[in-house]
Amino acid sequence: MKQQIIRCTDITKDLPDLLSNLQFDGLFVLTDKNTERFCLPRLEIIPEIRRAKKFRIPDGDEHKDLQTLSSVWEFLSQNGANRKSLLINLGGGMLTDLGGFAASAFKRGIRFVNIPTTLLGAVDAAVGGKTGINFNGLKNEIGAFAPAVAVLIDSNFFQTLDHTNLFSGYAEMLKHALLCGRDAMHCVSTWDSLNELLRFDLGKIDYAKLNNLLFESVLVKERIVEQDPTEQGIRKALNLGHTFGHAFESLSHEQNRPIPHGYAVAYGLVCELYLSFTKLGFDKTVLTQIARFVKENYGVFAFDCIHYQRLYELMLHDKKNETAAINFTLLKEIGEIEINQTANQQEIDETLDFYRDYFGI
Ligand SMILES: NC(=O)c1ccc[n+]([C@@H]2O[C@H](COP(=O)([O-])OP(=O)(O)OC[C@H]3O[C@@H](n4cnc5c(N)ncnc54)[C@H](O)[C@@H]3O)[C@@H](O)[C@H]2O)c1
Ligand SMILES: [Zn+2]
């Protein structure tokens, strides 16, 4: 099923327009405490939303679990949801992942609409049809491919986001821009979006401009997903920065100093562009531009060379690997994607040396 992505000019009109085109019997809205406070009030001038049954789940990834999922099913069931009902997920990636999965299985599947309220949610989680929950200590262990019928993108919601959540999403936008070359099929008008992103003033955000940059970025993901919804091939392009990134993220959790996903991806991008440079001749100037941007805006995730072995093991156990080798997505140049690349332990250690040298640790 193709997912409609709507760039909102005024969500109080765009949402009712969408709803009037979707036949449904019963409207349900999922929020968490922050989206109930900061985002729902903007939608409540819409009569359908005012009348809709609403349910608030706890926020935070630790609640992306079976218990919260079951509470959503209970809410739907007790409020008479049927197969023609529609669920609106109003929240960040945690909420759209869980709400989407809840909808995908309730009465064998009801339709849902995502309204991402975090930058990471908009650029990544809400789009592309992956839904799920964490289980047994494992991230996204249970889930389904289930696209929302529509995703409404409105940057105005991000005005209440803190700095960290904003930058976390921005890293995924950088990744999309790197995947987007002059002739790449999955790219829209500007192939030069990387430079626009590197120049964009994150200290004093122009939200209308951010909405345009974001929408282009979302389309990069959407077009890649359209070609390969279940990640047999080209969808792996979206893993750029994520092999090192996931290892950094996991190490940070093991050491009780967690870093947000997007920050881990930002550091991962630096490492994987370095590997792209050494293995595939990727342009060193672009590598340096990205590394400088990351250093200036994301600070550093510091570790010692005694942690190299653990990082290597974490990469080895990454669920993206299909064989015994570590799987990377690398770039020959901007937009020239090489999936299913690999690197040995020595190359990985060298990359970590480069990272630590560059960040001065
Ligand atoms: N399905 C996918 O393809 C995919 C891709 C990337 C990430 N994810 C998942 O997304 C989740 C992370 O998403 P996230 O970074 O959006 O985190 P999140 O959903 O946990 O939100 C972060 C915090 O921001 C708050 N918040 C949300 N909107 C707000 C707003 N407008 N103003 C103020 N606060 C607001 C939330 O209540 C929460 O406390 C993870 O569970 C990850 O696994 C999924
Ligand atoms: Zn990511």
Image: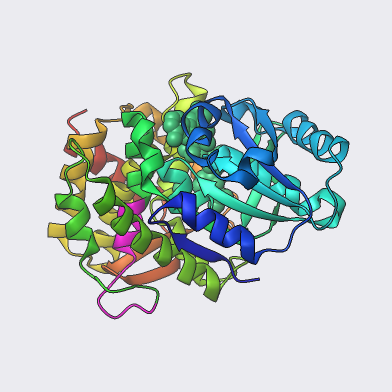
Q: Is residue 251 visible?
A: no
Task: Say which of 335 and 7 sits in front.
Answer: 7
Name the residue: 33% across, 45% down. 170
Task: Say which of 259 and 344 sits in front.
Answer: 259
Q: Which quadrant is home to the N terminus?
A: bottom right
Q: Does the magenta stretch include residue 343?
A: no
What's the coloring here? rainbow
In the rendered view, would you say 109 is above or below 252?
Answer: below
Name the residue: 57% across, 61% down. 18
In the rendered view, would you say 67 is above or below 174?
Answer: above
Q: What stretch is highlighted in magenta?
A: 173-185
Task: Say which of 125 and 351 sits in front.
Answer: 125
Q: Can residue 154 be seen in this view?
A: yes
**Residue 45 in picture, x, y percent from top left:** 53, 40
Q: Which quadrant is home to the C terminus?
A: top left
Direction from residue 287 to residue 30 in the image, left or right: right
Q: Does the magenta stretch include residue 174?
A: yes
The picture quadrant where one finds residue 268 is top left
Direction from residue 175 to residue 191 in the image, left or right: left
Name the residue: 65% across, 36% down. 138
**Residue 285 in picture, x, y percent from top left:** 12, 58
**Residue 298 in picture, x, y percent from top left:** 26, 34
Name the residue: 24% across, 70% down. 190
